[in-house]
Amino acid sequence: MTGINTKAASVRFQNVSKVYGGKVRAVDSINLEVAAGTLVTLLGPSGCGKTTTLRMIAGLEMATEGSIFIGEKDVTKLPATDRDVSMVFQSYALFPHMTVMENVSYGLKFSGFDKAATKEKALAGLELVGLTGYGNRLPSELSGGQQQRVAVARALVLEPQVLLFDEPLSNLDAKLRRQVREEIREIQQSLGLTVVYVTHDQEEALAVSDEIVVMRNAAIAQKGTPRDLYEAPADGFVADFIGEANLIPVEITALEGDTATVRIADYTHRLPSRGLPQGAAKLAVRPSRMQLVAGAGDGVAAVIDKATYVGSRMEYTVTAAFGTVFAVLDDVVTPFRVGDAVTISFAASGPVLIPAQTS
């Protein structure tokens, strides 16, 4: 069988901007590099520029300023048909009157393959996504997850240098999203594909990515591995967007080397300074890194405002002198109750200092 061959290439943006109507900057002078054979996710809220960035890689939008390279080739001014990329759309964009086999084969008919080679490649694509034997069905006879796999197979058989995904799981239910994202990641890794993936779902981004690029207001807020962004966010926006975070106002009262002493109400805590000076700052603390003990202790006095049982854990809303925070504890056997007096402290690792203001 001919099978699916891969020729993964890197993607590079140099000072790329997209301006609409001479005024609206959808993407503002970004620099970005996607290494060949990696999966990089563009993550951010609606209107941040992530989909426009994806469409500029595809050639569906043309850059107003800057240069775009696929491999060593400058594709900035090339049309979509000359860029050797494939895109999997949010809506799947399957032809409803065509069978699965015809949908997967569609692009191959325009790529110079004869009938026999087209059939072999289409069958290989269906096998790769676990749909062997489904070739004669119509899209309407498939589940949402199966339709998504057809769209992936149709893109893969074209053997693109870069594969693009635009919110590919947004039409699936939660359980199916987990399953399909694992399949996409497995295919990407097994074939060594270069993938650029757009989503606004933080958990999805953390699960599939080699690197995440967080976008805000048409620019890149931070980029790094999922663990880097989760454990060392650059500012309050990233801390709260990549997983939930409590942002607690603190005062850096002393610096000793790379270690800062911070004051939170009457409590002091030592942790890495991350280059911040003395003065006002914020402490970003994941709900799971909050520690609560009954009564008075070494920490910040607080009161339980809400207690919610969600099966595997307890979720608490807790109010202290500095404000209200959200905490998650595993103990569901002896939970705190609303009105209980508690003391808040923090896990040894996890809380990080960030600037007092998010630019």
Image: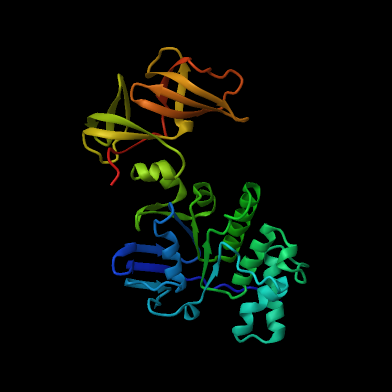
Residue 53 appears in which quarter of the rendering?
A: bottom left
Which one is in front, 264 or 103? 103
- Residue 8 horizontal/vertical position (percent): 51, 70
Residue at 43% across, 45% down: 241
- Residue 353 horizontal/vertical position (percent): 32, 36
Above or below: residue 313 compared with residue 44: above
Residue 348 appears in which quarter of the rendering?
A: top left
Is residue 304 in view?
yes
Q: Identify the image quadrant of the N terminus.
A: bottom right
Above or below: residue 245 compared with residue 222: above
Above or below: residue 213 compared with residue 95: above
Total labels: the figure holds 0
- Residue 218 horizontal/vertical position (percent): 35, 58
Is residue 10 in view?
no
- Is residue 236 left or right of 252 when viewed as pictured? right
Instruction: Specify how the rendered protein is coloured.
Output: rainbow
